[in-house]
Amino acid sequence: MSYQVIARKYRPQTFQDLVGQQHVTETLKNAIVNNRVAHAYIFSGARGVGKTTAARILAKALNCVKGPTPEPCGVCDSCKEIAAGTSLDVIEIDAASNRGIDQIRELREMVRYAPAASRTKVVILDEAHMLTGEASNALLKTLEEPPDRVVFVMATTEPENLEDTIRSRSQHFHFRALTFAEITKRLEEIAQKENLKIEPGATAVIARMAEGSLRDALSLLEQARAYCGDTIPDDQVRALLGVVPEDALEELVGAIAAGSADRALGLVHAFQKEGRNLQHFCREAIRHVRNLLIARVCGADSELIAATADQRPAIAKAAALFSEEDLTRFFQILLQTDDDLRRKPDPRVHLEMGLLRLINASRLAPLEELLAELKSGAPGSASAGTARVSSSGLPPVRQEISSPAIPAFTSPSRTAPPTPAAASTIPTRPEMNQQFPSQTAVSPAATSASSEVKAPNGNKEPVRVSGISPEQVAEIKTAIQAQQKFLGELVEQSIGWELEGAELRIYFSPDKRAFAEMIEGREPLEKIRAVSSTVLGRAVRVCARLESAAAAAAAASGSQELRAQFERDPLVRSMLQRFGGRITEVRARPEEK
């Protein structure tokens, strides 16, 4: 007799042999015992989980000489013929290649006649969802008026593509994918029967690569046996299947914990040099991070972890290095990286960028912490969180060193000397310092509503504006706050608004760099742009900028001195007393050219 591969040699012959499908086997056995076998069944599920095998076992159970019985003997002529595929009364059709109406018409003619030698004629349609619409309608007529002693079994991986009328006339059983533990156990049983010495790590790799399909797992075991012989070590199986070694995944976790970009990028270089599939490495990293997260949440002994007993201590040790929030963030970054690898032309670049985001992810500040900083309004806290925020997934802001500039918002009569501005991640604009009017004008005494725009954190120092009115700024802030509270809180931290042409610039102090960077994201800028364009009545572009530290200090000092100067002026004091007014804002008139 010719050699039989393991998948065929150990194909289940009874309902008890089916792995992981007890909900199906028990129902079928009860139906046979109670003589309530339906005329049509739909067996659906992933590949290699036992759909066609269950159909053959059902045929044996119905036609065994001891039957109908839920436990076919397997030794009678009927059972042997069905197992060998030579029974005249068990018709197995591949619907993928026999999908037309002519083939179904022939089938209808065949089932009109009584079984030749068996008790029941069984028709097995494999991949039944591939039937054409005309063929499905022809089959439907047979299912509506089924002949006596005929049972139809339709096996499919896509039951949703079957006609609703066919599904409504059949009993539907879904075959689930097998678990990691079920496949591992079955592999160990077969390895013992075949006298194979297979390491637990190799068994775990095969079970994981099978992705719930026992047939795939047995085929991989056959392949490993051909490569390694009767002794199957872990490392050779990984090399054969192109699986990432566990020590490489542990090295990646160590690099993330240590914040070492060199080590992480070195892994990518090594895999590229060895010709490995980089997307497979990314998916293995996703699986490993998932195991770490499960270990962190449920403990290293949880059955949810797809790992052997030898690997669990290392998983528990690595999981202790990170919080649940960190691991969740790692998982999201890797999922995005995997999507990039699938869609983009240069996988190495995207994998490297994804690993760099992993390295920097530990510096990200939680949203709750940022909201607390915004509410507290403490400059120190915002500055302290800058490093963590700037490493987020938001688009980076250009970095350049501003040139010496005249301090912004100063009086023409009193101008501070030029001072080199500090380096900023958001460029300052020297011309802004000249375009913003200095604060020298006194607003009219007012019983009317004040036109000042309050500075962040409730300070009375007004937000400085140019080319746009304080009322428009306040309206923009209110609209943003109504749409998205968090973004509104960010905008409230601004210290200046400048509208020049079609560009609206929002300025932040250097210690509010984190907030400016968050606004520079694509979605926040788009929301601010839409609101601003609506309020201003024309389309504008929006950008966030940092004011130089020297200019900010000079502006604040100059504003306070100017206010004090006007408050001491006898004429101003007389007007305030006479009309009952107050100074709300100090502003300079634009210089006439």
Image (tube, rainbow, N blue to C red):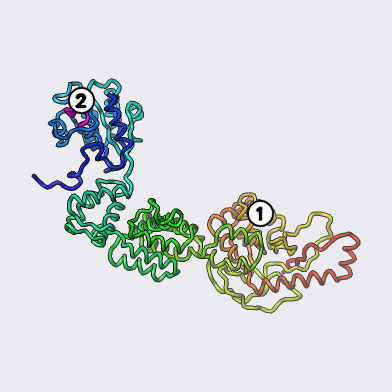
Whether residue 8 sits left or right of residue 440 in the image: it is: left
Above or below, 109 against 462 in this view is: above
Whether residue 12 sits left or right of residue 319 in the image: it is: left
Residue wearing tag 1: 476
Q: Amino acid at mark 1?
A: Ile
Q: Secondary structure at mark 2?
A: loop
Above or below, 294 against 317 in this view is: above
Q: Is residue 514 visible?
A: yes
Range of magenta residues: 60-66
Residue wearing tag 2: 120
Q: Quadrant of residue 33?
A: top left
* Residue 541 colored in magenta in the image: no
Q: Secondary structure at mark 1?
A: helix
Percent from the top left, x then y, of residue 591? 73, 69
Q: Nearer the viewer, residue 159 or 21?
A: 21
Q: Nearer the viewer, residue 208 or 283?
A: 208
Percent from the top left, x then y, of residue 208? 31, 52
User: Where is the N terminus found, in terms of image quarters?
Assistant: top left
Q: Is residue 357 visible?
A: no
Gap between marks 2 and 1 measured at Cα: 78 Å
Residue located 68% across and 57% down the image: 473
Percent from the top left, x then y, of residue 456? 68, 61
Q: Are marks 2 and 1 in contact (CB under 8 Å)?
A: no
Q: Quadrant of residue 124?
A: top left
* Residue 63 colored in magenta in the image: yes
Q: Amino acid at mark 2?
A: Thr
Percent from the top left, x then y, of residue 454? 72, 60
Q: Quadrant of residue 276?
A: bottom left
